[in-house]
Image: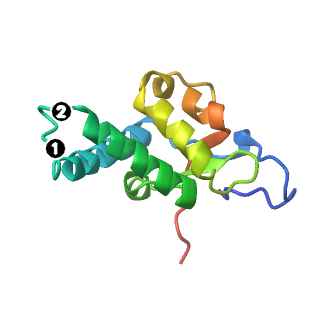
Amino acid sequence: MATRNSDTPGHALDPARLEPGGFGRRLAALLIDWALCMLVASFYADPRVVPWPPVVVLIVVNTVFIGLFGQTPGMALARLRCVSVADGGAIGLLMALLRAVLLALFVPAVIMDSQQRGLHDRAVGSMVVRQPRPTA
């Protein structure tokens, strides 16, 4: 299923037409990203002693990767993409920063609506969707 609504360019996407990423895939992507952030943070601080560096790395990674490319490394492996509901593209750095900070709080991420959009997604107008399989 395409992430852009080609019938009405420049208009909001119909979230009902998109296939939500699903809780399991989203959790897997977050765990992969968290493991990478723990690894990176361990180069300059021991996460067992100072717990905040991995959280900061997670916020930075989510901001840059989702803001510019629409997916983190974990999301790429889980075949997920975070798209703007307005146009189907990347949400931009400022909205990605807000989304990442809310994600780091964890509670907004687990409160989902019927379209599996967490509070952090609704706050910035994004939606995590499954990437279509490449056709041969």
Disc 2 residue crowd, few under 14, some 14–19, many 20+, Cα 10 Å = few
Residue 62 in view:
yes
Which x, y percent locates residue 43? 16, 53
- Gap in angstroms between the C-alphas marked 1 and 2: 7 Å
Please indicate whether residue 43 sits to the left or right of residue 14 in the image.
left
User: Which residue occupies the foreground of this view, 90 or 16?
Assistant: 90
User: Which residue occupies the foreground of this view, 120 or 32?
Assistant: 120
Looking at the rendered structure, the secondary structure element under dot 1 is loop
Q: How many labels does the image show?
A: 2
Q: Which residue is drawn at 87% across and 56% down?
A: 8
Please indicate whether residue 114 sits to the left or right of residue 33 in the image.
right
Disc 1 residue crowd, few under 14, some 14–19, many 20+, Cα 10 Å = some
Vertical side of 94 occupied by 114: above or below? above
User: Which residue occupies the foreground of this view, 75 or 57?
Assistant: 57
The quadrant of the image that shows the N terminus is bottom right
- Name which quarter of the figure residue 25 lies in: top left
Q: Residue at x 26, y 40 (%)?
A: 53
The residue that disc 1 covers is: 45
Name the disc covering residue 50, or none.
Answer: 2
Looking at the rendered structure, the secondary structure element under dot 2 is loop
Vertical side of 101 occupied by 90: above or below? below
Is label 1 in contact with label 2 (beta carbons under 8 Å)?
A: yes
